[in-house]
Amino acid sequence: MKKNLRLLLILLTLAFIIPSAVAQDSNSELKEMSDKMFQYTNDRNFDALLDMTYPKIFELVPKETMKTVFISMFQGTDEMAIDLPKQTPEYTLTEIYKSEKDSTEYAFLSYDMFMSMIFKQQEFDDESKDMMIKMMKIQGMDASFENNSKVNVKAPNRLVIFIKDNETNDTWKMLNYDPNSPIFADLLPVEVIEKSMAYYQKLQLESKKKN
């Protein structure tokens, strides 16, 4: 059980996005990049997705290792499969922010992600289901069991950071917002991290008000 949970959290940390809809930002360059990102995800074009990823992460996690994880996530293993449907949920794309210290530019994309996990060699009893649901809740996700081996997950307010700086040779790249990851704080400029944290907290508060 604990092994499955650890694997699940690693996969969710590295998972890319599946949204597509009408963005609320008029910047044509980011809109075009978003459309490509969505299409590559639906096509399972991992090489193209990794080419769009913020390059500094590859100093910590080799590109081929990440590709292997993505293939495993989408195609499944002997123990578990993740069904990430080719869907088009609505998303919000912010304005572009510019750093006060250098030439860094960044923006945020938020969306709700839906997926299912099928455990091939394990069935959950009531106690294990409760533990899984609580673990998901800690990660900011809502989970419900369809049966004893399949769990449906809603991950609200997923956040993607678009960034253009010296690390990217002044071209737009992307990175998932994940403050729980031990490497996240080492990847981005402090200003971008602080702004993304503030924006994420705003999303969370707005969600609570709606509920």
Image (cartoon, grey):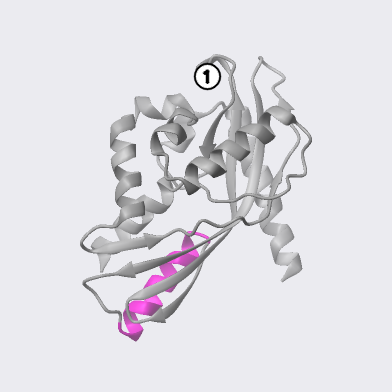
Is 104 located above or below residue 24 in the figure? above
Whole-percent x, y for residue 111 in the image: 63, 53
- Indicate left or right for 74 with 31 as reference: left
Instruction: Report which quarter residue 150 is drawn in.
Output: bottom left
Instruction: Report which quarter residue 206 is drawn in.
Output: bottom right
Whole-percent x, y for residue 134 in the image: 44, 71
Is 130 located above or below residue 64 in the figure? below
Quadrant of the image containing the C terminus: bottom right
Q: Residue at x 75, y 67 (%)?
A: 210
Is 149 located above or below residue 184 in the figure? below
Residue type marked 1: Thr
Q: Nearer the viewer, residue 28 or 108?
A: 28
Q: Outermost residue, bottom direction?
A: 126
Q: Residue at x 66, y 15 (%)?
A: 103
Is disc 1 placed on a helix, strand or loop? Answer: helix
Q: Is residue 42 magenta?
A: no
Q: Residue at x 29, y 69 (%)?
A: 119
Q: Nearer the viewer, residue 18 or 208?
A: 18
- Indicate left or right for 7 with 30 as reference: left
Q: Outermost residue, front direction?
A: 43
Q: Nearer the viewer, residue 51 or 15?
A: 51
Query: Which residue was labeled with disc 1?
Result: 168
Q: Residue at x 20, y 61 (%)?
A: 78
Q: Main secondary structure of the magenta part?
A: helix
Question: What is the magenta range?
Answer: 125-140
- Indicate left or right for 168 with 8 as reference: right
Whole-percent x, y for residue 128 in the image: 32, 78
Whole-percent x, y for residue 194 in the image: 62, 36
